[in-house]
Amino acid sequence: QSDLQRFCHETRLAMGDVETSVSVTAKKLEAAWKEVRLDVEGLETKRKRDKKGVDEAIQFINGRTISALDVSDKSLRSLDNLSNVLHLALQSQSVASALNVQDFNERLKTPYVGAQGVADKKKAGRSGGLDPRSLFRISYQPEPAVFEGTSFQRSELLALCEKLLAKAHTALQQVPAAKQHTEIAGATT
């Protein structure tokens, strides 16, 4: 019996130690659980704040992208309008150039009349008029014209003008995304 009592006593002491150990472990576990729960809540708060920041950045970028697209669209429409205006201006210059060439050629072919030996009106008075024998044919001989510091014959400048207009038409047609122009009997569409 004494062995039994000793065994019971030792068992009670051991159980007391186990209870104390379990109680200490439970307190440590509860403290660790609170700490983990606070860490998780902190991480959740940080994740929500980060998500909100990312969402705001995405909205800002979307707004900027939409604004950039609007500006780009307006610029494209303005460039298309400018292309149309340039096309019309080039057509107008081409017409003017064609008229100048035709005018120059007609002046070369048109006979002009000059008078030889005509006295000054003050000396001659108004008595007789012109003697038809003093009349003779003269041709159109324009003086050279100066362009960018160089002297050119009129026909050379007219040819240069046509050449520059042809280059401008070619350059305008090569602009990417430019609206193609069609000409129908002088009308542009």
Image: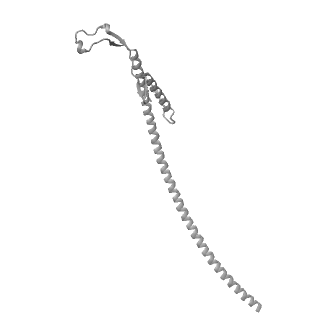
Relative to residue 57, is residue 42 depicted above or below? below
Relative to residue 13, is residue 127 depicted above or below? above
State the scheme by which the image is colored.
one colour
At a point 52% along the width and 54% down the height, the residue shown is 58
Quadrant into which the N terminus falls: bottom right
Q: Quadrant of residue 35?
A: bottom right
| In-front residue for pair 81/129 | 129
Quadrant into which the C terminus falls: top left
Residue 45 percent across, percent down from the top left: 54, 65
Residue 92 percent across, percent down from the top left: 41, 28
| In-front residue for pair 45/100 | 100
At a point 44% along the width and 22% down the height, the residue shown is 155
Tally of numbered tags: 0
Taking the image as shown, residue 89 lies to the left or right of residue 134, namely: right
Residue 34 percent across, percent down from the top left: 58, 73
Q: Is residue 1 visible?
A: no
At a point 42% along the width and 22% down the height, the residue shown is 154
At a point 23% along the width and 13% down the height, the residue shown is 123
Relative to residue 19, is residue 129 depicted above or below? above
Taking the image as shown, residue 45 lies to the left or right of residue 151, namely: right
Taking the image as shown, residue 54 lies to the left or right of residue 4, namely: left
